[in-house]
Amino acid sequence: MLNTLKLGLVLGAALIAVPFTASAQQAPAAYNQCKACHVVGKNGVGPNLAGVVGRKAGTVEGFKYSDAMKAAPAWDEAQLAKYLADPKGTIPGNKMVFAGLKKPDDVAAVIAYLKTLK
């Protein structure tokens, strides 16, 4: 019985990991639109995005944020999805000039990728 339970947990974890892995593998192509301003591991024109998922918006050390971004909520997946699709509409007054990702699959792929950045 215990071995069956362990096997079920392992298989369940594998099934959950499959979509995340597939999205993360797609993300670098979708993320190409972000790379002009966001350098992983350091601030560039935009802030460093390592660890962004779950972090309070407007808090990366050494980056000068707009007041709108400083007042924004934490970056959970739902907030990131809205913001990546429509940055100016989601947080009016932020400094990001990018109009947003138009394809929901690209938004999901970028979020999956961002979740891998620590």
Image: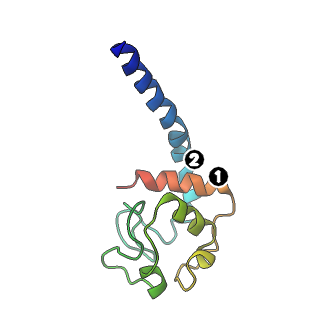
Question: What residue type is disc 2 on?
Answer: Gln
User: In the image, what residue occupies the spot 46% across and 77% down?
Assistant: 72
Q: Is residue 32 left or right of residue 59?
A: right
Q: CA distance from mark 1 to mark 2?
A: 9 Å
User: In the image, what residue occupies the spot 40% across and 77% down?
Assistant: 58
Q: Is residue 69 above or below residue 85?
A: below
Image position, residue 100 (x, y; %)? 63, 69
The answer to whether any part of residue 29 appears in the image is no
The answer to whether any part of residue 111 appears in the image is yes
Q: Are marks 1 and 2 in contact (CB under 8 Å)?
A: yes
* Label 2, residues with CA under 10 Å away: few <14, some 14-19, many ≥20: some
User: In the image, what residue occupies the spot 56% across and 60% down?
Assistant: 32
Image position, residue 116 (x, y; %)? 41, 50
Q: Quadrant of residue 31?
A: bottom right
Furthest residue to the right?
102
Across the whole image, how many numbered discs are drawn on residues?
A: 2
For marks 1 and 2, the one nearer the N-term is 2
Q: Is residue 53 above or below residue 73?
A: above
Q: Is residue 27 left or right of residue 46?
A: right
Question: What residue type is disc 1 on?
Answer: Asp
- As drawn, the label of residue 90 is none
Between 43 and 22, the residue placed more toward the observer is 22
Q: Circle 2 — which element?
A: helix
Image position, residue 104 (x, y; %)? 66, 56
- As drawn, the label of residue 26 is 2
Give the residue pinned by disc 1: 105
Q: Circle 1 — which element?
A: helix
Q: Is residue 96 above or below residue 103?
A: below
